[in-house]
Amino acid sequence: MRVAVFAGDGIGSEVTAEAVRVLEALDLLKLELVYGDVGGVAYRKHGHPLPAETLEIARSCGAVLFGAVGDFSCDHLERHLRPEQAILGLRKELGLFANLRPATVFKGLEDLTTLRPEVAEKIDLLIVRELNGDVYFGEKGIRTLDDGRRQGWDMMSYAEDEVRRIAHTGFKAAMGRRRKLCSVDKANVLETSQLWRDVVIEVAKEYPEVELSHMYVDNAAMQLVKNPGQFDVIVTGNLFGDILSDQASMCVGSIGLLASASLAEGTFGLYEPIHGSAPDIAGKGLANPMATILSAAMLLRHSYGLEVQAARIEAAVGRALADGIRGGDLGGQAGTKEIGDAVLARL
Ligand code: NAI
Ligand code: MG
């Protein structure tokens, strides 16, 4: 198990240090950690936010644990040298096409969601978002029409193999959970969505145990707030997934708890908290490391099939929260290291 650790900027190094302590505590005999520089840290040392040697490290490993990038002292730099290019470059170079974001309400935190507690407590869902296609990567531009009006345009498209690939990811994820998959599209209006739906239905034949449903994206947005407990796995395209995954995260509470995975074909994946480098609290030992610790659990599950160990980490985080261990993001007093200690003690 060769795992790359790219801590990055700001609170990145503080939160990944705690996740590494948790991984090491599991006593996985074959675990080898390889450290690399990304973001502003890498720019200052190597002149680039994603140096070739960092990419080499990633390629030599089975998974990457990523902290955060985004360093305001780099704000003056040209776009291709900005810290954020590290994550975009890794996505592209490593073929990370599926973004997974779980949303679960931990016991004792029902009061932190903006939904009624009896609605929120039922949330246990996973959003699988396609990451390499859709309107973000189509032809685009701003042009001036013959009559002088300016027109902006972005082309939405999905090829069937792109849909098939992400559909498989969605079905496989559902197989490891409650075996329900909801495919979200806008097939009543968009041709791209019609193809999406047709292909998902074709792929479904390979997963007879999974109950498949379809939902239009506008209704999905309503249902996520009205009755989120109905969802197990949601699979959707890049644009709809971008919006719905942010919406789902806020239904469950705090940014310091939200983990994510970005998967390539096979077992390779990059795992990171959804939050950024939090420059306002960086270096103060105040960041909540739980999102990164939960990302490490996803790493064990998705890249190494270590479901038992992943579940142990998640249970330890859950118990720490239930025991009242709360970081500043949850209105509590516990610091980064204290939260790491609390999770380790329960592990
Ligand atoms: P942010 O997520 O860094 O911070 C937003 C707010 O949440 C801040 O008040 C911060 O203190 C708080 N916060 C974030 N994580 C926390 C944690 N673990 N514990 C306690 N509080 C936490 O988002 P922001 O401020 O918009 O961006 C800061 C920088 O991070 C920017 O340069 C941005 O581009 C970058 N960024 C990087 C991401 C990545 O590495 N994948 C993702 C999002 C933003
Ligand atoms: Mg977003």
Image: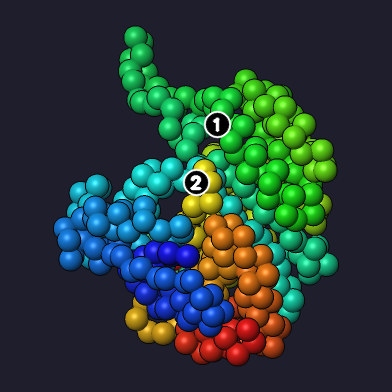
Name the residue: 57% across, 65% down.
300
Q: Please state which of the two labelled residues, at mark 1 or mark 2, is closer to the viewer.
A: 2
Name the residue: 58% across, 25% down.
160
Q: Nearer the viewer, residue 259 or 149?
A: 259
Q: Regarding mark 1 in the picture, which secondary structure is present there?
A: helix
Name the residue: 18% across, 66% down.
45
The x and y percentages for residue 315 are 69, 76
Q: Give the residue type at disc 1.
A: Glu
The x and y percentages for residue 55 are 31, 53
Give the mark count: 2
Q: Regarding mark 2 in the picture, which secondary structure is present there?
A: loop
Q: How is the image coloured?
A: rainbow
The x and y percentages for residue 209 are 83, 43
Q: Is residue 296 left or right of residue 285?
A: right
Q: Is residue 44 visible?
A: yes
The residue sitting at the top extreme is 146
On the rendered image, what quadrant is the C terminus found in?
bottom right
Callout 2 environment at 10 Å: few (<14), some (14 to 19), or many (20+)?
A: some
Q: Find residue 255 and report its image quarter.
A: bottom right
Q: Nearer the viewer, residue 134 or 151?
A: 134
